[in-house]
Image: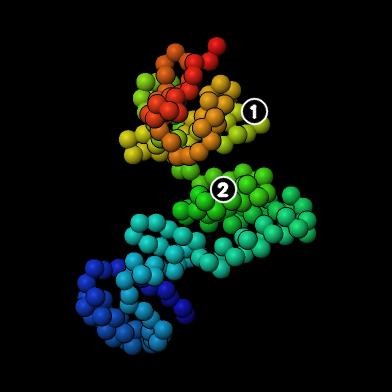
Amino acid sequence: MLMIIVILSDDKDFLHKDLIYIKLYFNTIGLNVKDNYNIYTVDCRGINFVGYVFYHTHTLIRKSIKYKIIRLVNSYLNREIDKKEFKVRMCAYYGWLKHADAKNLLYKIQSLTGVRYSNWNGKRTNIAKYYGKYVRIIQVINYAKYFRINFIRNGKAYYTDSRDKTLFYSIHRLNHFPINFKITKYDWRIYTKNRKENIKPQI
C-alpha cells in the first residue's frame, strides 16, 4: 500500500520528531517509510503533489504536464490533429490549469491556437455598480456575441459581460493590461489615471 503524506511546519526540529513517530507507528502496523522522504523549505522547491507545485504565494502545474501541453499545442499547429480533437484533449489539461497560476500559459495557448481559455475565478457583477470608480482591468475576452471583462476592485476579483462596442474599443485603444480605469456613469467611456492616456469623448 502506498500513502503520500505531506506535513507542514515552520519548525524543522518538529518535522524530524514527527518523522520518528511516524516510523515507529508504521512499524506497529507492518508498514515502512520509503528512503526518499524529504524535509525542506517550501520556498526553495515547492510541494510537488497531485500535478501541482505548491508555494506559499502561488501554485504552478508540474513541469511534465506543461511539456505535454506544449507537445499537444505543437501537434495542432503542425496539423497533426484537427481543432476538434485538440479541444477535446485539451479539456483534461484545462482541469489542471484553471486551478493554478497559469494565466500567462493560457494566454499563450490562446494566441497560438485561437482557442480561448481563462482561469479567472471572479464573481459575476454588473459594471454599472462601479460608475465613477476605478477598477483594475486584468483581461478582456472577446466572444462571438459579447465580450467579458475580468477586473479587480478593492482586492476582490469580478467579471462582467457586455455587448457595448464603444466600451470594447475604448479599452483596446490602450492595448496593454493590467491597467486602472475609471468608469463613467453617463456612457461607457473609460479614462485612465494617466492623463496622457486619456480617451477622448465619443460622439
Image position, residue 195 (x, y; %): 40, 26
Towards the viewer: 134 or 199 = 199
Say which element carries label 1.
loop
Determine crowd level at label 2: few under 14, some 14-19, many 20+ residues with C-alpha closer than 10 A. some
Which picture quadrant has residue 166? top right
**Circle nearer the N terminus (1, 2):** 2
- Whether residue 71 is visible here, answered yes or no, is yes
The crowd level at tag 1 (other Cα within 10 Å; few <14, some 14-19, many 20+) is: few
Label 1 is placed on what type of residue? Answer: Lys
Question: What residue sits 47% from the left and 55% below the top?
Answer: 100
Q: Identify the residue at horizontal 60%, vertical 34% (top origin).
A: 142
Question: Residue 86's spot in the image, x, y percent?
Answer: 70, 53
Residue tagged by mark 1? 145
Q: Residue furthest front?
A: 196
Q: Identify the residue shown where x is 49% and y is 19%.
A: 200
Up-down relation of residue 131 to residue 6 (above or below): above
How was this image coloured? Answer: rainbow
Disc 1/disc 2 C-alpha distance (Å): 21 Å
Does 95 sit above or below residue 11? Answer: above
Q: Residue at x 43, y 75 (%)?
A: 3
The spot of residue 156 in percent (x, y) is 36, 38
Amino acid found under the numbered disc labelled 2: Tyr
Q: Is residue 129 visible?
A: no
Nearer the observer: mark 1 or 2; the answer is 2
Image coordinates of residue 170 in percent, x first then y, are 53, 25
The circle drawn on residue 107 is 2
Image quadrant assignment for residue 132: top left
Task: From the viewer's perspective, tell me whether residue 43 is left or right of residue 88.
Answer: left
Q: Secondary structure at mark 2?
A: helix
> Quarter holding the C terminus?
top right
